[in-house]
Amino acid sequence: MSIENLKPETLALHGGTYRSDSATGAVAVPIYQTTSYQFRDTDHADKLFSLDEDGHIYTRVSNPTQDAFEQRLAALEGGAAALAVASGQTASAYSILNLAGAGDNVVSATDLYGGTWALFAATLKHFGVEVRFVDPSDPENFRRATDERTKAYYAESLPNPKLNVFPIREVADIGRELGVPLIVDNTAAPLIIRPLEHGAAAVVYSATKYIGGHGTSIGGAIVDGGNFPWEEHAERFPTLNQPDPSYHGKVWVEAAKPLGPVAYVLRARTVLLRDVGAAISPFNAFQLIQGLETLPLRIRQHNENAVKVAEYLQGHPKVSKVIFPRYATGEEKRRAEAYLKPGSYGALLGFELKGGREAGRGFINALQLFYHVANIGDARSLAIHPSTTTHSQLSEEDQLATGVTPGYVRLSIGIEDADDLIRDLSQALEQA
Ligand SMILES: *Cc1c(COP(=O)(O)O)cnc(C)c1O
């Protein structure tokens, strides 16, 4: 049997080299709740520190539970390797800091998760990294914003609230022409959008969302596509191509060679996790493995339910508009068809209440099954009214620019019974 062409349902349970615990035979990945690992002797310690032998030294940098999660996720995503970190925010921050320093810039789509927006617009600026925001509806905007200090392009595959699928191939191609890697936050669309297959160089996740699914654990990950020619652009990427004085002069593209095309994620681990240290706990890595194992099954149910809910809302007299990739038109429809797995649209949807802000409040307060939370991607269904919560600090004008109107409601559809969800929406709409 070829292990190569396994389907996502199989990879979610078998991806990576973990089969059973080498010490005990345990089938479930054990929680290795340890900080440190005993060296066999001084020679062994030497080899581990110089990266001449693979193994664990200290859990801030690597851990066997984390390793099993990383391998499983990399296999599922079709990447060369992955790095698990403390949160989705850490994943996006490290994905940039791994390439860019003071004086450098990154070109990012404007449609971003609020936390990423704050990181890019304010915190990275304090580090001297400029983020140039461009409208992703025209991919050429990325080219126009690029110069010799541009280290990466960044975008979300399925950003909310607009839910316009990002033109991954178009922007990745521009980047490959100019020597700039595209990093895609695929948090909202695991398995249904495959950024690496469309030319992205790396994928970041908030594993807190669909990957965990249970809503118990914060975590994040960076998946290295292993497909970007860092060495061909040695001048643009000194962090990977120049001797690293913090690691006995190692050149990361060289150091990675025995391991595969994994220089990007190798440096994020050995330098950023070592020095900045936002490591995932072994317990959370274990929790995220539990989530990953049923991810393909849950995604299918999320999708099915979302389609039913969208259809119900489309016909409701109090709803003026439903925002869901299935209902995209024009160029947006073409992109949705090009990048979404056929028949899948994700489980995020937005809708517009004719009654505006007051109707939005009335609707949210009347919900009984849907949770009123800022989160997405939980197995439970979730709802939020952005203009009175996540977007309330913005001016009305800025809210509109982000796609949030006073009557806009966002739903993250869970895996409950769709008819039960529709009954809850129906009674809440009566009170909107
Ligand atoms: C939640 C989220 C993040 C941040 O992830 P945390 O795990 O909460 O740090 C980043 N991007 C997107 C699209 C998200 O939904």
Image: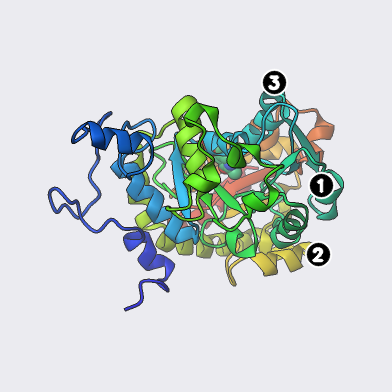
Amino acid on which disc 3 is placed:
His
Residue 208 to residue 20: above or below? above
Rendered-image quadrant of the C terminus: top right
- Percent x, y for residue 311? 63, 64
SS at badge 3: helix
Taking the spot 83% from the left edge, 50% from the top edge, the residue there is: 143
Rendered-image quadrant of the N terminus: bottom left
Left or right of 415, for residue 367: right
Do residues under tags 2 and 1 come within 8 Å of each other at their CB atoms? no
Q: Label 3 vs label 2: CA separation?
A: 37 Å
SS at badge 2: helix
Q: Residue 91 shows which numbered tag?
A: none
Residue 314 to residue 56: above or below? below
Amino acid on which disc 1 is placed:
Asp
Task: For label 3, count other residues whose C-alpha is less than 10 Å away and answer few (under 14), some (14-19) or many (20+).
Answer: few
Nearer to us: label 1 or label 3: 3
Q: Nearer the viewer, residue 300 or 68?
A: 68
Q: Residue 331 shows which numbered tag?
A: 2
Left or right of 11, for residue 40: left
- Percent x, y for residue 225? 55, 56
